[in-house]
Amino acid sequence: MTLLGTFKGNYRNDIGYFNSAGRPDPDVVPHRANLPRVGLDDVAAAATGVMCSVAIYLQDGDLVSNLTFISAGTAAGTPTNHFAALYNGAGVLLAQSADKLTEAWAADTAKTFALATAQRVTKSGIYYAALSVTASTVPTLVGSIGAKPFLTGEGNLSQTSGSSLTGTAPATIATPAFKRQVPLVIAT
């Protein structure tokens, strides 16, 4: 018997799924998520025309083509613009989706945003998946509540930036402000 009991595999490989917030099933599309699928609730996204970006751990070699956000109990009311974008850890834009303009977004509905250019991750680490919705009523999203960073070097799990955004993602995440509500995002 060893420290790991009867386990004979590589322990680091076996727990690697902790970084993706859910062990990928080999029979489904490979994905990364920023939160586990438990303990989630209805959280506010951001004000109309404001971008909300959430930290997501991506692994070297991942190919990110889509970002999926899930609306919660409140649907989008009269949307005029909504897009998703992927930023690197320094907050520099890598790719964004097309603007979905006035496309409806019902309550309790997953919405997948295809990035204009799929991104191959070349360095494991924290990236930011962003969503901006301009609408008379911004949908609430499935997500959780996060604590403000307090240790040196910790980043925000969720943050807001920008104002009066329409269909184009800013080149950088400028002046991010801590946001307690952390929406779930799934990268595929």
Image: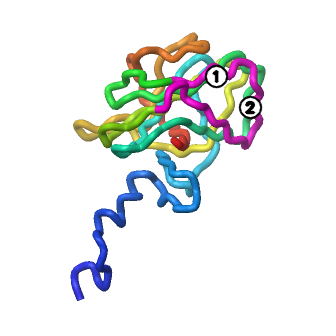
Element assignment for label 1: strand
Q: Say if residue 77 shows up in the picture.
A: yes
Query: Could you say which is closer to the camera, residue 46 or residue 78?
Result: 78
Sequence-first disc among 1 and 2: 1
Q: Say if residue 52 shows up in the picture.
A: no
Q: Is residue 96 left or right of residue 20?
A: right
Residue 158 lies, in percent from the top left, at 45, 34
Q: Residues within 10 Å of mark 1 (few under 14, many from 20)?
A: many
Cα gap from disc 1 to disc 2, whole angstroms: 10 Å
Mark seen at residue 153: none
Vertical order, 33 against 77 (above or below): below
Taking the magenta stretch, the answer to whether it contains residue 157 is no
Q: Which residue is located at x 44 percent, y 32 percent?
A: 119
Quarter in which the N terminus is drawn: bottom left
Q: How is the image coloured?
A: rainbow
Report the residue that reaches farthest toward the top: 164
Query: Could you say which is closer to the camera, residue 170 or residue 119?
Result: 119
Q: Quadrant of residue 11?
A: bottom left
Q: Residues within 10 Å of mark 2 (few under 14, many from 20)?
A: many
Vertical order, 140 against 26 (above or below): above
Residues tagged 1 and 2 counted as in contact (Cβ below 8 A): yes
Element assignment for label 2: loop
Residue 132 lies, in percent from the top left, at 58, 23
Residue underneath mark 2: 105
Residue 83 lies, in percent from the top left, at 60, 24
Q: Quadrant of residue 2?
A: bottom left
Which residues make up the magenta segment? 96-118
Residue 76 lies, in percent from the top left, at 73, 28
Mark seen at residue 82: 1
Q: Quadrant of residue 178?
A: top left
